[in-house]
Amino acid sequence: MNMRDDVYQFLNHYAGKCIQNDDIDNILFDEYNVKRGLRDKQGVGVLAGLTSISTIEAHNLVDGKKIPCDGRLYFRGYDIKDLVRGAVSEKRYGFEETAYLLLFGELPNKKELSEFENILGGFRSLPTNFVRDVIMKAPSKDIMNTLTRSILTLSSYDEKANDLSMDNVLRQCLMLISELPMMAVYGYHAYNHYENDDSMYIHRPAPNLSMAENILRMLRPDMKYSRLEAEILDIALMLHMEHGGGNNSTFTTHVVTSAGSDTYSVIAAALSSLKGPKHGGANIKVVEMMADLKESVKDTKDEEQVWNYLEKVLNKEAFDNRGLIYGMGHAVYTLSDPRAIIFHDFVESLAKEKGRMDDYELYAMVERLAPQVIAKERKIYKGVSTNVDFYSGLVYSMLDIPLELYTPIFAMARVVGWSAHRMEELVNVDKIIRPAYKSVSDKKVYENIELRNKAKLSGEEYKKIEQKP
């Protein structure tokens, strides 16, 4: 987008004014006991609501004291490790069963699961000419923005878009769970065709296949994939499906739902939150950091060289100079992220199948060294461990999923959690969510524009004139 010189100068000048006038002294946050980011200095979130959908545990209570422990994640009371283990041991895909659990609060029997899978399969279609008229128009590398636009446009095809009855909201949620992968993958193919001059593929999903299988089927030119590939993508979807009410995008879901907004607007708002690099885009930063490590370190099997690189990253001397080792640490977990632990073994299996063991071993080395580097260089309030984003990017690259779809894959899973939280908010809502902000601006006396004009032109100070009503 080209700008005239005068527009550029205007923006440059007034952006500086924005920075100058919007900057608030850090001391004031402590003075007024403001929990920045709705978290205290120990990283504990401000209690803003109740939920029965999922539970995150990072501490044990011993003699009234919180003792850090290995992280635990429960969906409707079930340990995520047991849910993954159950699907893997029974050689079936777990996404649909876990989605049923989150939405309806209980595990399905065979008949209920089959009926649910048929309902999801039946919703795997888009309105006539939607792909041509919406997805293929103005394709963008930012697939998250493409998704948001597509979902908001879908509302115009729904005669009951604003109906907040539970059966209608459930219909909309199930439809979006089924259609979101189509919109994301088709959006990527449109971008790849028009912007990268590559071939374009629009493969229809199969109603009898799992969500993970359909994603790979729609994405790949030959529609082929191995059982292990589909199983690991299925596990990735399960792990990303839900993570408490306090994460940014889920809290956004509660906030926008509390305003009485429609399902399409709520999910679009959640998508806009998720796309940020501090949230759903974190795995992309991990992949970029690891690529930079390979370019910067002569011998990636030498622990000392890798250690030195990580020190430079932490000291803002390498990669993006922000001082962050991406994929390390979590807002809640202390000793470990259970999702990262589950991922670890499956990542190794996939790396062996794909001939990517060198990459896996480098990731494993960074996973081991980074917490030691951080502990040495930084004063920290809680333990630092690998989070789920650390390995998810490696998994997606081994599945030949393009970088542009990394965050959309997260969204394909998390839309289930958003849907569950939207319905929970609707059932329990009685007030719009409205936190308080304390004003720290000084009161000023209005002066007419002629005085303001003279003052700015001459640089002299003019006495403020109190205006009469």
Image: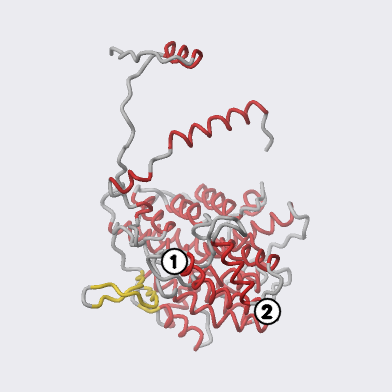
Indicate which disc, 1 or 2, sits on the residue closer to the N terminus: 1
Query: Could you say where residue 243 lies in the image, as x and y percent from the top left?
Result: 41, 67
| 445 shown above or below 224 | above
- In the rendering, at what x and y percent does residue 180 appear? 55, 61
Q: Write down the residue under mark 1.
A: 330
Residue 179 falls in image quadrant: bottom right
Q: Residue furthest left?
A: 63
Q: Would residue 429 appear left or right of 264 to someone viewing this image?
A: left
Q: CA distance from mark 1 to mark 2?
A: 26 Å
Label 2 crowd (10 A; few <14 / some 14-19 / many >=20) = few
Location of residue 440 by image quarter: top left
Left or right of 106? Residue 376 is: right
Task: Give the number of the disc on residue 358.
Answer: 2
Mark 2 lies on a secondary structure that is helix
User: In front: 96, or 14?
Assistant: 14
Q: Amino acid at mark 1?
A: His
Residue at position x 54%, y 79% in the image: 344
